[in-house]
Amino acid sequence: VQLQASGGGSVQVGGSLRLSCKVSGRTEDVKAIGWFRQAPGRERQYLSYIQSPLNNEAYHASLMGRFAIRRDDAENTVSLQMNNLGPDDTAVYYCAAATRGFYYNLRSTYDYWGRGTLVTVSS
């Protein structure tokens, strides 16, 4: 399974961005796609996941409804819509694929990772 994240960039406080994760390879093995982020000097943080084929989705409580994850099976992509961004959202954002397990909020559950995409939020 290969993943490619895109859509990062610079945005002002209060702005929005939509990240996309293109999934290829043995997509039929994927049970969930997760989004994580890592700010400088910080641990990689879980943000959200969506299961396949079920569309069960979940979010880190701290996001307070600002982010929305969606899956497009026709395009084999998973997007993360991010709204009302603030300086604390500045980080490298990663998507990851899990082919096993149940605890999709844990980094260790994921088998495959894409290269990150940088999001910078400035005032």
Image (cartoon, helix red, strand yellow):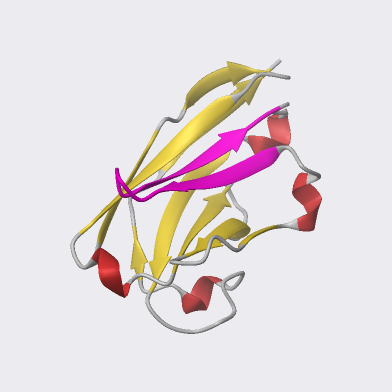
x, y (%) of residue 35?
Answer: 52, 54
Q: Is residue 13 left or right of residue 2?
A: right
Q: Is residue 19 left or right of residue 22?
A: right
Question: Total label count?
Answer: 0
Question: Farthest bottom residue?
Answer: 101
- On whether residue 72 falls in the magenta region, the answer is yes
Q: Is residue 51 left or right of residue 48?
A: left
Magenta-colored span:
67-83
x, y (%) of residue 51?
Answer: 51, 65
Q: Is residue 4 left or right of residue 94?
A: left
Quadrant into which the C terminus falls:
top right
Quadrant into which the N terminus falls:
bottom left
Asked if residue 84 is positioned above or below residue 118 in the image, the reply reads: above
- On whether residue 34 falls in the magenta region, the answer is no
Residue at 53% over, 41% down: 80
Residue at 60% over, 52% down: 41
x, y (%) of residue 104?
Answer: 56, 72
Q: Which of 31 and 18 is in front in this view?
A: 31
Residue at 81% over, 45% down: 64
Q: In which quarter of the image is residue 89?
A: top right
The secondary structure that most of the magenta stretch takes on is: strand
Asked if residue 11 is positioned above or below residue 105 in the image, the reply reads: above
Asked if residue 7 is positioned above or below residue 44 in the image, the reply reads: above
Q: Which of 114 and 58 is in front in this view?
A: 58
x, y (%) of residue 114?
Answer: 33, 54
Q: In which quarter of the image is residue 81?
A: top right
Q: In which quarter of the image is residue 87?
A: top right
